[in-house]
Structures are given as structure tokens and as C-alpha cells.
């Protein structure tokens, strides 16, 4: 009986929220593999900056914290 009263819009919103929260959980749990992790960096991929640091480390450039010269 209850399922008949659910509108298509509310069903859509429910699934959209489920998918988005699942995507956020997956992103928060993602870790950068050790071999491309910058020295002194974090393994949590919480921002694009950390990802970029890991990429520059993998490319052989020395790692400096953000804002420490260029």
C-alpha cells in the first residue's frame, strides 16, 4: 500500500541521494598507492592537490609542500 503512494520524483531523489552518498564514501576511502605517494604526504585522496602531488612524485620531481617555492 505504501509503495503505491510514492511519487516518481521522490523515488528519483532518493536514488540520486543514495548514488551521491555512495560515490562520496568511495572517494573518501580511496587511497593513493604507496609507490606514487609523495614523501611526507598523505595517503588519503581528499583533494585534487594531493593527487597532483602524487603524480609529480611519480614523474620523478621532488616533492615540496604547497606554497614552498615552485
Image: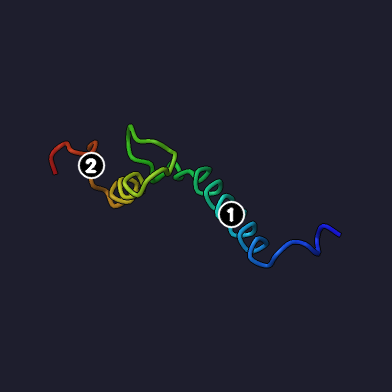
Local crowd at mark 1 within 10 Å, few (<14), some, or many (≥20)? few
Question: Which residue position is annotated with label 1?
Answer: 17
**Cβ atoms under marks 2 and 1 closer than 8 Å:** no
Q: Is residue 10 left or right of residue 20?
A: right
Residue at left 32%, top 35%? 39
Residue at left 82%, top 57%? 2
Q: x, y (%) of residue 7?
A: 70, 65
Report the label total.
Answer: 2
Outermost residue toward the left in this view: 69
In terms of sequence position, does the residue under pointer 2 or pointer 1 come before the other?
Answer: 1
Q: Is residue 55 left or right of residue 66?
A: right
The answer to which of 59 and 70 lies nearer the viewer is: 70
Residue 31's disc is: none
Locate the N terminus by quadrant.
Answer: bottom right
Outermost residue toward the bottom in this view: 8
Disc 2 or disc 1, which is closer to the eye?
A: 1
Question: Which residue position is annotated with label 2?
Answer: 62
Q: x, y (%) of residue 46?
A: 41, 43
Local crowd at mark 2 within 10 Å, few (<14), some, or many (≥20)? few
Element at label 2: loop
The answer to which of 61 and 21 lies nearer the viewer is: 21
Q: Quadrant of residue 70?
A: top left
Residue at left 77%, top 62%? 5
Q: Quadrant of residue 20?
A: bottom right
Q: Quadrant of residue 40?
A: top left
Outermost residue toward the top in this view: 40
Q: Is residue 24 above or below residue 10?
A: above
Q: x, y (%) of residue 25?
A: 55, 46
Amino acid at each position: 500500500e505504501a509503495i503505491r503512494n510514492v511519487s516518481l520524483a521522490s523515488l528519483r531523489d532518493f536514488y540520486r541521494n543514495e548514488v551521491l552518498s555512495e560515490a562520496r564514501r568511495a572517494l573518501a576511502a580511496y587511497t593513493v598507492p604507496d609507490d606514487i605517494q609523495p614523501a611526507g604526504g598523505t595517503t588519503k585522496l581528499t583533494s585534487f592537490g594531493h593527487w597532483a602531488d602524487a603524480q609529480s612524485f611519480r614523474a620523478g620531481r621532488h616533492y615540496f609542500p604547497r606554497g614552498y617555492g615552485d
